[in-house]
Amino acid sequence: MTAISAKSKSSPAKPRLVVFVVYPNIVLLDLVGPLQVFSHAQDPASGQNGYECIVASVEGDLTETNTVVSIPSVPASSLGDRQIHTLVVVGGDGAIPGMQNTELVETIAKLADGSSRVCSVCSGALILAATRLLDGRRAVTHWEDCNMLAETYLNIQVEMDPIFIKDGPMWTSAGITAGIDMALAIVSEDLGRAASFEMARSMVVQMVRSGGQSQFSPTLGRQLRDQTNQFEELHSWISGNLHLPLPVETLAERVNMSARNFARVYAAVMGVTPAKAVEAMRVEKAQNMLQFTNRSIKLISAECGFNEEDRMRRAFLRLVNVSPSDYRQNFRVA
């Protein structure tokens, strides 16, 4: 198979062509999330739309999604020799039969051959992998599909944690909304950070997340473990009081339990001790402050309840595998 062509960047005044490849039973948000980003991102140099978007399929016509909405598409063959700047393979439940569909895989490979950048959203990585274009590269997909991707395509270095990965001209993203994060990162690379942040603000996205961040939400993880909401109010209180000492006795008093019984019940429900849970929440708050504030690491350690920089550093190395200073350097948002 021919390698992806090296293309020079398009003139800022000329919209970059983005082609989304769809097939039966895609996840609607896998398509419309990134499509919304590219459809409205503005090129600061021209003041015009930075991208032209086309939705394509093997044969064209309407493509079923996992909702009541069907998506119109053009035949991939109608694109002819048009220069594709970014090719996006959408994900969905149809990805598993899609990766075994020779015509679909060959169509994507042909489109990729003339593209400057090739991407997948969520389980779209399974179909992209079938083209062999991910061989020898790092890749990510939805956490539920990571094992299948790794076991089916042994030449791919599959990573479960990141929300998206860029390896050369190949971009892969994790589950569903991570496609929006990937699209915003691409806009930042093509049009500049200001354009990406403006698009994020327009979409009311909380923040522009870097690819190295985890696709697993710690807050969601706590909610999944505490399905009866037994400790939801306690977790909310802890989040607002991380600057205070939070011994088990204080936490137990908040839920009207003895310290011994609270520690036992909490560990049984949440899978960690109260002390470990508090430490993880302190790290989460510190991560956010390192990203979005100019406060010194010393001040952040105090506001998050670590009190000593070295104590925060040790917690980061245990839970995030990097130091606070390295985390800020990698994920700082201006």
Image (cartoon, rainbow, N blue to C red):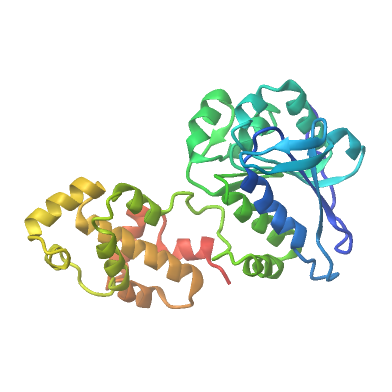
Work out whether residue 51 or residue 155 is closer to the camera in this orientation and state it: 51
Residue 221: x %, y % from top left = 36, 50
Q: Is residue 166 visible?
A: no
User: Relative to 330, does residue 120 appear above or below in the rendering?
Assistant: above
Q: How many marks?
A: 0
| Residue at figure coordinates x 38%, y 62% from the top left | 284
Quarter-of-image position of residue 48: bottom right
Residue 257: x %, y % from top left = 10, 61
| Residue at figure coordinates x 24%, y 46% from the top left | 271
Q: Is residue 30 visible?
A: yes
| Residue at figure coordinates x 59%, y 27% from the top left | 155
Q: In the displayed orientation, state which residue is furthest to the front.
A: 68
Which quadrant: the N terminus? top right
Is 252 placed left or right of 101 in the picture? left
Residue 127: x %, y % from top left = 66, 31
Which quadrant: the C terminus? bottom right
